[in-house]
């Protein structure tokens, strides 16, 4: 056995032996602990219907057309445009904690509106308040990056994403079963009532136990907004490349993401329970891999893992059109592969991808700029990606559902060579 191979095997055994110690060290950080375990409180019953059944609820219960569903999804995407940048600036000037508490309190309003909604205009109001609550997301991401050292960011984000994704492991299938049993109206009302109580619990825990991570010396209290933005724009070239990748990948994914459940039910003839099972299995695969991939990102680098994701995600989203009518095993297999791509990393849900993607951003962005830059990039990706869902709905209605998936694939694959060729990962001494 060669010396280099023996060394790698020994390092691998050492890494495995240290997993428990690394986890203990990560969770010893109270902020990571609080953030990781309060996020699932909000997501528990919310994920029972919004992850897989939001568009179906709009169609079946509210009576929304595909065009209206696309419009509402577009407004959801625009939330990054409206509030991400102000949220990032506030987080860097005044700290992370208070903004997180404000955003958490605002999260109680959408479920109250959903309880009373009878028209799509009511849903629009709920979506807009949901956008206000997302004001705190740049502060959230910055606090996670602030709370872990550079050499453990992959693991730190892996632990955070793994724990926060726990509701997605089982709640979509629970949601499907409950919706099939009670109907969309009663089931969604029950889930929203429970969500309100859990948001209150999360707010109390965050107020009591979160610790501010931005010291007063790092805050831009004497800078104007213009100076703050000018400073934020002076960032690493690699971040701008990642912005382009995020824009392309996010645009492609958002074109069809809200239409996938409708396609699965109307074209493939699956039940709500089957759709929930597929979402649960996909989330389970992703959650089981997130922590190992976070550790792997710390060992071999972030770029190889993210590059794989750039190819996998658009292909697995498009592959749904290859599923035969009623062939649930095929659909389930594609969703499982999609879960692997989600765990590897990417920016398909905005500026928050897998642990490798988030760790790479943390390596490239100085602490005092993290909130502003996160918000700035979310604003850019949100601005350009805003019409994506409307475009997908237009192609769906004007041509065919399959055509929407074909166009999304062609757009999404463009991000793969851009990331592979132009992103440069910083060396150890160059990380913030």
Image (cartoon, rainbow, N blue to C red):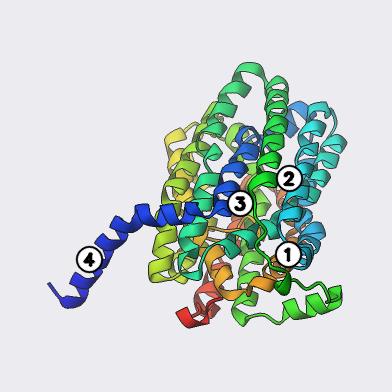
Q: Residue at x 67, y 33 (%)?
A: 198
Under circle 1, the secondary element is: helix
Question: Residue, x 50% and y 77% (percent of image)?
Answer: 425
Q: Nearer the viewer, residue 50 or 296?
A: 296
Q: Nearer the viewer, mark 3 or mark 4?
A: 4
CB atoms at circles 4 and 1 under 8 Å apart? no
Q: Tell which tag, 3 or 1, sits nearer the viewer.
A: 1
Q: CA distance from mark 3 to mark 1?
A: 29 Å
Where, by quadrant of the figure, is residue 241 drawn? Answer: bottom right
Q: Tell me which numbered mark, 3 or 4, is placed earlier along the sequence.
A: 4
Q: Which residue is mark 2?
A: 104
**The image quarter in which residue 59 lies:** top right
Q: Which mark is residue 405?
A: 3
Work out whether 295 lies above or below 262: below
Q: Is residue 194 above or below residue 310?
A: above
Q: Which badge, 1 or 2, is on the more N-terminal residue?
A: 2
Q: Mark 1 = which residue?
A: 375
């Amino acid at each position: 056995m060669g010396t280099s191979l023996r060394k790698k095997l020994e390092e691998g055994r050492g890494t495995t032996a240290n997993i428990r110690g690394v986890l203990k060290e990560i969770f010893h950080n109270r902020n990571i602990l609080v953030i990781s375990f309060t996020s699932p409180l909000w997501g528990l019953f919310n994920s029972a219907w919004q992850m897989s059944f939001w568009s179906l609820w709009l169609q079946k219960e509210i009576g929304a057309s595909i065009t209206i569903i696309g419009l509402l999804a577009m407004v959801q995407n625009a939330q990054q445009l409206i509030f991400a940048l102000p949220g990032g600036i506030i987080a860097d000037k005044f700290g992370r904690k208070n903004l997180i508490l404000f955003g958490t309190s605002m999260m109680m309003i959408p479920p109250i509106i959903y309880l009373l909604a009878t028209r799509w205009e009511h849903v629009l109001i709920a979506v807009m308040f949901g956008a206000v609550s997302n004001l705190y997301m740049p502060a959230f991401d910055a606090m996670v990056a602030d709370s872990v050292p550079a050499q453990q960011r992959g693991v730190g984000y892996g632990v955070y994403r793994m724990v926060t994704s726990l509701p997605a492991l089982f709640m979509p299938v629970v949601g499907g079963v409950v919706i099939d049993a009670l109907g969309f109206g009663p089931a969604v009302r029950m889930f929203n009532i429970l969500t309100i109580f859990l948001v209150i619990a999360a707010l109390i825990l965050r107020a009591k136990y979160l610790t501010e991570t931005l010291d007063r010396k790092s805050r831009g209290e004497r800078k104007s907004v213009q100076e703050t933005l000018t400073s934020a724009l002076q960032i690493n070239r690699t971040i701008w490349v990642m912005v382009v990748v995020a824009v392309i990948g996010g645009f492609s994914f958002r074109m069809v993401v809200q239409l996938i459940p409708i396609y699965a039910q109307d074209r493939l003839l699956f039940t709500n329970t089957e759709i929930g099972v597929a979402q649960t299995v996909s989330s389970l695969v992703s959650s089981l891999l997130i922590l190992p991939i976070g550790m792997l990102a710390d060992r071999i680098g972030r770029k190889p893992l993210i590059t794989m994701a750039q190819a996998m995600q658009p292909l697995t989203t498009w592959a749904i059109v290859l599923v035969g009518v009623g062939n649930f095993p095929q659909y389930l297999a594609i969703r499982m592969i999609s879960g692997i791509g989600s765990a590897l990393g990417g920016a398909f849900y905005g500026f928050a991808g897998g642990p490798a993607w988030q760790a790479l951003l943390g390596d490239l962005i100085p602490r005092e700029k993290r909130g502003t830059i996160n918000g700035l990039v979310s604003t850019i990706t949100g601005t350009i990606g805003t019409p994506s869902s409307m475009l997908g709905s237009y192609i769906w209605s004007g041509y065919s559902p399959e055509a929407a998936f074909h166009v999304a694939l062609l757009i999404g694959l463009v991000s793969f060579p851009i990331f592979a060729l132009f992103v440069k990962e910083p060396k150890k001494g160059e990380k913030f």
